Image (cartoon, helix red, strand yellow):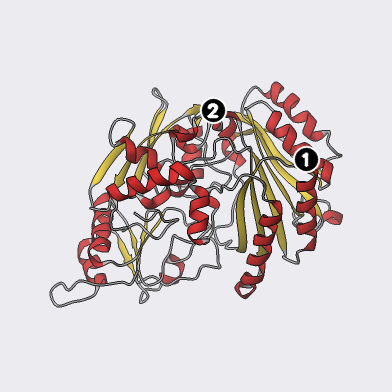
Amino acid sequence: MKARCRTVGGVTNPIDELNANVKGEVITADDAGYDRAREVYLARFDRRPLAIVRAAQTDDIAYVVSLARETGIDLAVRSGGHGSAGHGVCDGGIVLDLAGLKDLDIDVASRTAWAGAGLTAGEYTTAAHAHGLATGFGDSGAVGLGGITLGGGIGYLSRKHGLTIDSLLAAELVTADGELLRVDAESHPDLFWAIRGGGGNFGVATQFQYRLHEVGQVLGGLLVLPATRDVITSFVDEALAAPAELSTIANVMTAPPMPFLPPEVHGQLVVLAMLVWAGELDEGNRAIAPFRAMATPLVDLIHPIPYPEVYPPEDPNHRPVASARNLFLDRVDEAAADTILEYLSSSKAMMRVAQLRPLGGAIARVPVGATAYAHRRSPVMANLAAVYGDVAEAPSYDTWVDEFAGALRQDDPGAYVNFVGDEGEAGVRAAYPGETWDRLVEVKRRYDPTNVFHVNQNIVP
């Protein structure tokens, strides 16, 4: 959409309006902090917005949304900036940065919490753990709550307690007309359905009310195994058959030069898996035993840990250049395992990975139509990625991950919206198949008929 600026007092510059009306910080290209402020997690996205607004209050958000609606200027909304398509920044528009919205009110008695959309998963999890409680998010503590929640939220408590949206009780949302709404099962239920998986298409979420679950110590950590056909297939089969207390992520990848890995396996293909058991520890050891028996582990770091330690420390300056594709699998059989090993062996990327996430459990117990996340019956999610050093190499690695996904794809045509890259309408439709798409379009028409919120995996009204 081409940016248009209305004239106010003879000035056709929205920056003047932002400076005059926003309490939070307004950062432009003339400011020393501009380049850092426009960064998102993935370094291949190097976009230059007109301004970055670090909202200090809800009124700032409402004003910026109204300005975008009235001028037609692009509006990117950013919570943590980890999105696979780089939608946390835009060229020539306004970035609305929610990172300052970090209020957190935990009600231990009711096991609920109101959390600002700018909190990270790690910040929330650490605070909740002080009370022996947790809400499930993803596999990184650095992601912002806004993006992961609105897309669904698949992580280490998903098989036990469901997706993040399955613990979402309510949200406060600034809609396209600048109005602040509380949405829940009784108030604006159509909108509440849509924001549970429909992404940022319907407004700016300022805070969320979550259900908290009793989670203290878990049995968790890394298990590194040789990457063979039998290990890959057995791992996924065991993970799907395991009790719902166990959630796993298996990364079939080139072994990084980490100090806990033997030097002789650096650069070799391994299964680097994270296992988290959220239940009685003795039962957890029995559930994890089959994984340890698949092959002689190269590394076994599984032990009782406080739940927040499932999120490893992360370098805030780490900004990888990567190409990735997401898909769901019906099974990981010998043919799929052979395809994974073949493609990973053939690539020259400095790191290449096929991440397999066995699902099921509490995720699948929710009816398919209950939320806008429509993949409740998909048993396995796969993320395929190549990490490299030069953005100029992106086209060749984009082709590689496309071909990899095409070779691995089975009967399930779907994709998880939080891991869909900049793939156009086809990628969005894969995230929202059939009736889910039709229903989302109707909600979009009702709450954002002019598509103010279009810098996202867009549902066009």
Query: Which is more toward the observer, 82 or 456?
Result: 456
| Residue 45 position in % (x across, y down) | 51, 67
Is residue 171 among what the camera can see?
Answer: no
Query: Which is more toward the observer, 391 or 19?
Result: 391
| Label 2 neighbour load within 10 Å: few <14, some 14-19, many 20+ | few
| Residue 86 position in % (x across, y down) | 49, 61
| Residue 430 position in % (x across, y down) | 53, 50
Q: Residue at x 70, y 51 (%)?
A: 408
Relative vertical location of residue 50 with respect to residue 258 in this rendering, above or below: below
Distance from the alpha carbon under mark 1 to that under mark 2: 24 Å
Relative vertical location of residue 118 with respect to residue 169 in this rendering, above or below: below
Badge 1 amino acid: Thr
Local SS, label 1: helix
Would you name the residue on which mark 1 appears? 233
| Residue 277 position in % (x across, y down) | 65, 30
Residue 168, picture quadrant: top left
Question: What mark, if any, has residue 186 been given in the picture?
Answer: none
Badge 2 amino acid: Arg
Would you name the residue on which mark 2 appears? 365
| Label 1 neighbour load within 10 Å: few <14, some 14-19, many 20+ | some
Residue 242, picture quadrant: top right
